[in-house]
């Protein structure tokens, strides 16, 4: 829509481009990740007769497909990460318990721990 707005504004100012020039400008300004699609369009279609609307439709379809692939890949990666974190949390609980137990034993061996234990036993 931005491109169409710019082209229409230029027409109002007296500058117009042919359909072929507009198609080439759009293909030229696409990011590097679109290079395979641009190459496919250039090889498969005659750019001098390719309507702008058909090009835009093709690019929008490709963009939707790319977003779907990214979304599916992101879902798969999240599932794997959740499985891994779930396994880690079980081992972390055992590690936490071991750490707490060892710290408690050290506390009881210290002077403060002995005093606290005596107070606890007296109650």
Image: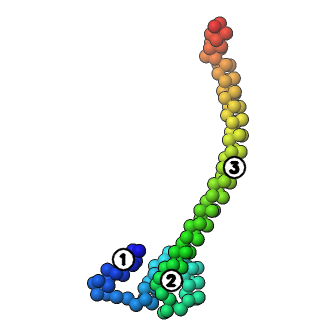
Determine the residue positioned at 43% across, 85% down: 22
Q: Is residue 99 above or below residue 13?
A: above
Q: Please report contact status of discs 2 and 1: CB closer than 8 Å, yes or no.
A: no
Image location (x, y in percent) of residue 57: 51, 78
Dot 1 or dot 3, earlier in sequence = 1
The disc placed on residue 28 is none
Work out whether 70 lies above or below 51.
Answer: above
Query: Can the viewer see residue 111?
Result: no
The percent coordinates of residue 12 (x first, y second) are 29, 83
Front position in the image: 95 or 10: 10
Local secondary structure at mark 2: helix
Q: Position of residue 71 (x, y in %)?
A: 59, 62
Rate crowding at label 1 as few (under 14), some (14 to 19) or many (20 or more) other CA atoms within 10 Å: few
Sooner in the amino-acid sequence: mark 3 or mark 2: 2
Q: Evaluate whether residue 97 shows in this view.
A: yes
Label 2 or label 1, whichever comes before in sequence order: 1
Distance in Å between CA atoms under marks 2 and 1: 18 Å
Question: Of circles 3 and 2, which is in front?
Answer: 2
Q: Quarter holding the N terminus?
A: bottom left
Question: How far apart in space, not on screen, are marks 3 and 2 (Cα)?
Answer: 44 Å
**Helix, strand or loop status at disc 3:** helix
Give the residue number, with chain letter if any, for mark 2: 54
Q: Determine whether label 1 and label 3 are within 8 Å by CB.
A: no
Please identify the quarter of the rendering in which residue 80 is found.
bottom right
Q: Which residue is mark 1?
A: 5
In the picture of the structure, the residue carrying the numbered disc 3 is 83
Q: Quadrant of the C terminus?
A: top right
- Asked which quadrant contains residue 2, the reply is bottom left
């Amino acid at each position: 829509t931005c491109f169409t707005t710019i082209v229409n504004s230029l027409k109002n100012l007296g500058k117009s481009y042919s359909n072929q020039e507009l198609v080439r400008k759009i293909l030229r300004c696409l990011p590097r990740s679109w290079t395979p699609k641009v190459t496919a369009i250039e090889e498969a279609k005659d750019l001098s007769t390719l309507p702008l609307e058909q090009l835009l439709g093709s690019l929008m379809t490709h963009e939707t497909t790319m977003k779907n692939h990214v979304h599916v890949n992101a879902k798969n990666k999240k599932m794997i990460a959740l499985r891994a974190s779930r396994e880690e949390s079980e081992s972390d609980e055992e590690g936490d318990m071991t750490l707490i137990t060892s710290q408690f034993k050290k506390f009881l061996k210290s002077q403060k721990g002995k005093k606290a234990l005596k107070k606890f036993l007296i109650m």
